[in-house]
Image: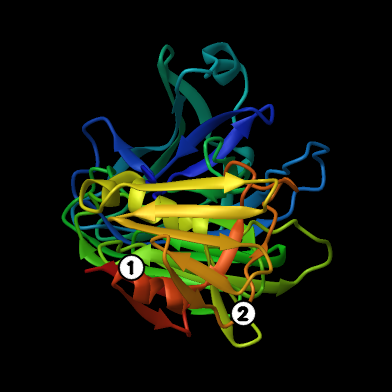
């Protein structure tokens, strides 16, 4: 299981291919426009491979199109609107933020006609903020649409064991009258190979496009999605308390992307589990507070792994169908354990990325495994 926390679903880019900036919902600036209601917003991301990079891990790009439908419930008025862009962090450079936007080819349209938006720096320092500002006039009870488009760079998860990237959008703020009628998120992937996409809200999938809709809400919550390449026969491992949504995207786009080693692999009718990721299931993040401590040791010379948890010691060897349990009992496995390299061509955990059949180890440890073949998720519960 992976422990992944995303802070906000903000439209994210990278300045000079380096530092990230974020954007979000267009908001009302100043005291005008208190009668303006945001009826609907559509956020549409198209993720595609960035061919301009020559580094080992290639951050992708995405085209963003955000469509707002506003209605004036009051008398005629003019409203100054700002599309936010912000960034900060340890390595963030405020001078670069001041000089250059991370949202490339930024454009704004009003009722189908392109209008000028001026980038205004609001603050510089540890946390930097700017607004893309435009003024919109409303007649009494008039409804108008504002469209924002740009191209941005997906972020890299530097601390991830995976070649994980993502894009984000912030639904909070805006200061519009009442609740937001509808917020639709649509993400299409145009990447080569198979990818796992994860988010902390339910996702509906149609081919290579994912959807989610919020209705009649205050838009105070934030969310996010991330994705990373995997094997076509891979599956996700998660704890029963994990509410993350997972989807698998496979496209016919040209090109290749080296896959990560998934937690579960189903091959020749047998499900195999990665011992390093089973170790993480017991010993990482939130589950580590409620589950017993686990240890995993790897003997490169013998190509053997020893997994210790809850008083049990399991010993397995590559290409050996016998699993030694607690030093005295042998369990015959339905298939031979094997090694699978990670994204960078090396083995991940202490030289070990060994896979063993899932069902025998589940029985020995007293776990329950719920298999969702449609979404390709294995939910593991420990006692």
Instruction: Give the number of marks.
Output: 2
At x 33% / y 41%, what residue is drawn?
A: 27
> For mark 1, what is the residue?
365
Mark 1 or mark 2: which comes first in sequence? 2
Above or below residue 128? Residue 113 is below
Q: Is residue 326 left or right of residue 343?
A: left
Q: Is residue 191 left or right of residue 295?
A: right
Look at the picture and state if 19 lies above or below 308. above
Q: Where is residue 48 in the image (x, y as percent from the top left)?
A: 70, 57
The residue labelled by disc 2 is 335
Q: Nearer the viewer, residue 100 or 250?
A: 250
Neighbor class of circle 1 (other Cα within 10 Å; few <14, some 14-19, many 20+) is some
Cα gap from disc 1 to disc 2, whole angstroms: 19 Å
Which image quarter is the C terminus in?
bottom left
Residue 65: which quarter of the image?
A: bottom right
Q: At which x and y percent is residue 372?
A: 42, 82
Left or right side of 38 for 151: right
């Amino acid at each position: 299981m992976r422990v992944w926390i995303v802070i906000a679903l903000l439209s994210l880019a990278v300045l000079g291919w380096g530092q990230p900036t974020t954007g979000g919902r267009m908001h009302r600036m100043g005291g005008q426009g208190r009668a303006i209601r945001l009826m609907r917003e559509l956020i549409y991301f198209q993720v595609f491979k960035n061919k301009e990079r020559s580094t080992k891990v290639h951050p992708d790009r995405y085209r963003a199109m955000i469509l707002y439908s506003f209605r004036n419930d009051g008398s005629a008025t003019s409203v100054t609107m700002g599309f936010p862009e912000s960034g900060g962090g340890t390595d963030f450079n405020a001078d670069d933020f001041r000089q250059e936007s991370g949202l490339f080819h930024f454009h704004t349209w009003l009722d189908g006609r392109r209008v000028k938006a001026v980038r205004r720096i609001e603050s510089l320092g540890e946390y930097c903020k700017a607004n893309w500002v435009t003024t919109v006039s409303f007649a009494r009870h008039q409804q108008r649409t504002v469209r924002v488009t740009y191209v941005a760079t997906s972020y890299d998860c530097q601390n991830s064991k995976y070649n994980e990237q993502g894009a984000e959008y912030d639904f909070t703020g805006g200061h519009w009258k009442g609740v937001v009628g509808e917020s639709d998120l649509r993400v299409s992937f145009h990447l080569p190979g198979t990818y796992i996409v994860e988010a902390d809200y339910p996702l509906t999938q149609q081919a290579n496009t994912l959807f989610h809709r919020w209705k009649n809400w205050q838009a105070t919550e934030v969310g996010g999605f991330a994705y990373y390449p995997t094997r076509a026969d891979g599956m996700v491992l998660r704890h029963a308390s994990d509410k993350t949504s997972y989807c698998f995207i496979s496209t016919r786009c040209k090109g290749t992307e080296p896959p990560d080693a998934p937690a579960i692999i189903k091959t020749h009718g047998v499900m195999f589990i990665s011992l390093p990721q089973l170790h993480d299931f017991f010993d990482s993040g939130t589950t580590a507070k409620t589950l017993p401590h686990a240890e995993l040791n790897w003997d490169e010379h013998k190509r053997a792994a020893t997994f210790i948890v809850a008083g049990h010691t399991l010993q397995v060897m590559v290409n050996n169908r016998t699993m030694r349990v607690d030093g005295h009992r042998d369990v015959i496995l339905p298939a031979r354990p094997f090694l699978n390299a990670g994204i960078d061509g090396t083995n991940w955990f202490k030289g070990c990325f060994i896979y063993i059949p899932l069902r025998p180890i589940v029985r020995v440890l007293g776990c329950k495994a719920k298999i969702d073949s449609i979404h390709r998720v294995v939910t593991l519960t420990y006692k």
